[in-house]
């Protein structure tokens, strides 16, 4: 069953989650401007296609020596209404001097297991789709683990299965550079999916690992979509038609992804604005463009950020500039990533960001059913199809 057929079972999926879809019909007019209430929002499955647990105000990131989250981090996470998020793990950059990238990835992966275990009263590691349902019933946040660069498997396809057993359910084929699978956003968009890349896609399909094409070049993106037997995700990106950066996706890529039953997540990143100074106005515009191109069943969000509020914006600007400079120096930065950027939407940052986004979409006339899909139900359906 492909995802377009699968979506006809939305009511069934909602019943399993205890969700309420009666707030707006599937054919409700986009002229509806009813605000989303707190009570309604709390019933929704809210998903972040790429997030991270950290407190941007805290030098420790909000993680204590015993791997326990600080009260601030824990409280902001729970206040966000988030049901599930994908945590980046492994070694995304092409070189870790003196280290074996496989060994480094296992070590970083182990640290995320420790973090989840130490906070098991509020976090649940997702090893299969049933864990998402279980976390929902227990009022916990489900955490799925994923890589942002498949260079971690080296030339050994069996590493895909190994990492799957260690909790990796999503694998991004490339980061910004070139690897053994193909080219990322910083290199030639004409680089193809390699022969080994085709084998890797086949192996990921076999293992029910969700393939992520964020950061990919145009050609590898199109060829991987065609090669995959399962729907894919572009978990955190923007629309190139609105902001012409290599990290954003062309309409052709978006259409091919949707035709295959996949899911596009719009990030809360500076690349949404041509001048790299994005706000929620740009975020909403990219979501609307993606809906127009892909259809409302194939659009979601992937913040590429955290969930705590900002105590001192000037301090955060300084620390962000320092991190950006480090990424520029080591070759990890993408085009448009520059000093002065903020890697979040400054007007809707913090634990309220998803609820505020829901109401910004409602103000634009999107009905509650569509908003609920974008905030998480579409992702729920995709994960159920690929992992279920």
Image (cartoon, helix red, strand yellow):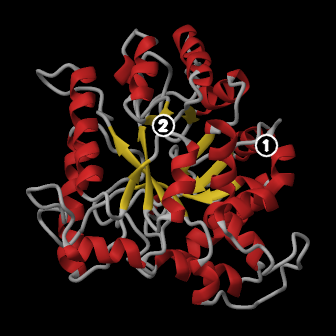
Q: CA distance from mark 2 to mark 1?
A: 27 Å
* Image coordinates for residue 363, horizontal then vertical, percent: 69, 87
Q: If you read the primary sequence from the N terminus, does the residue marked by circle 2 or circle 1 appear first?
A: 1
Q: Nearer the viewer, residue 48 or 214?
A: 48
Q: Quadrant of the N terminus?
A: top right
Asked whether residue 121 appears in the rendered view, the answer is: yes
| Label placed on residue 169 | none
Give me the residue at 47% from left, 65% from top: 138
Q: Nearer the viewer, mark 2 or mark 1?
A: 1
Is 252 placed left or right of 206 in the picture?
Answer: right
* Image coordinates for residue 140, horizontal then vertical, percent: 43, 64
Q: Is residue 255 above or below residue 69?
A: above
Q: Is residue 306 above or below residue 367?
A: above
Is 258 placed left or right of 121 in the picture?
Answer: right
User: What secondary structure is found at the residue carrying circle 1?
Assistant: helix
Is 8 placed left or right of 266 in the picture?
Answer: right
Q: Quadrant of residue 351?
A: bottom left
How packed is label 2: few (under 14 Cα within 10 Å), some, or many (20 or more)?
A: many
* Image coordinates for residue 228, horizontal then vertical, percent: 68, 25
The residue that mark 1 highlights is 3
User: What secondary structure is found at the residue carrying circle 2?
Assistant: loop
| Label placed on residue 185 | 2
* Image coordinates for residue 367, horizontal then vertical, percent: 78, 79
Asked whether residue 237 appears in the rendered view, the answer is: no
Give me the residue at 87% from left, 69% from top: 26
Q: Is residue 270 above or below residue 191?
A: below
Q: Nearer the viewer, residue 42 or 263?
A: 42
């Amino acid at each position: 069953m492909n995802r377009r057929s699968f979506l006809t079972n939305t009511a069934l999926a909602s019943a399993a989650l205890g969700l309420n879809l009666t707030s707006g019909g599937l054919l409700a007019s986009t002229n509806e401007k009813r605000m989303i209430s707190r009570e309604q929002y709390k019933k929704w499955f809210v998903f972040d296609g790429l997030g991270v647990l950290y407190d941007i105000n805290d030098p420790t990131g909000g993680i204590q020596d015993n791997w326990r989250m600080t009260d601030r981090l824990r409280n902001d996470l729970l206040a966000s209404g988030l049901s599930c998020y994908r945590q980046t793990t492994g070694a995304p950059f092409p070189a870790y001097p003196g280290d074996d990238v496989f060994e480094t990835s296992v070590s970083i992966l182990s640290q995320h297991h420790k973090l989840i275990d130490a906070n098991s009263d509020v976090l649940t590691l997702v090893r299969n789709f049933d864990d998402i349902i279980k976390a929902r019933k227990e009022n916990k946040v489900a955490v799925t683990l994923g890589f942002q660069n498949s260079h971690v498997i080296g030339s050994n396809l069996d590493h895909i299965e190994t990492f799957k057993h260690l909790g990796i359910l999503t694998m991004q084929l490339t980061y910004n550079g070139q690897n053994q699978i193909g080219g990322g956003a910083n290199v030639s968009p004409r680089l193809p999916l390699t022969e080994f890349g085709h084998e890797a896609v086949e192996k990921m399909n076999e293992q029910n690992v969700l393939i992520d094409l964020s950061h990919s070049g145009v050609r590898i993106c199109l060829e991987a979509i065609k090669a995959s037997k399962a729907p894919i995700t572009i978990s955190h990106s923007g629309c190139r038609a609105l902001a012409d950066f290599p990290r954003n996706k062309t309409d052709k890529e978006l259409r091919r992804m949707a035709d295959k039953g996949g899911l596009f997540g719009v990030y809360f990143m500076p690349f949404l604005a041509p001048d790299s100074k994005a706000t929620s106005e740009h975020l909403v515009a990219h979501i609307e463009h993606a809906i127009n191109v892909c259809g409302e069943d194939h659009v979601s969000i992937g913040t590429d950020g955290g969930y705590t509020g900002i105590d001192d914006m000037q301090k955060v600007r300084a620390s962000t500039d320092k991190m950006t400079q480090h990424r520029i120096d080591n070759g990890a930065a993408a085009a448009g990533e520059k000093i002065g950027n903020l890697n979040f939407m400054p007007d809707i940052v913090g634990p309220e960001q998803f609820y505020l986004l829901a109401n910004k979409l409602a103000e634009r006339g999107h009905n509650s059913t569509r908003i609920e899909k974008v905030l998480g139900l579409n992702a729920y359906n995709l994960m159920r199809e690929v992992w279920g």
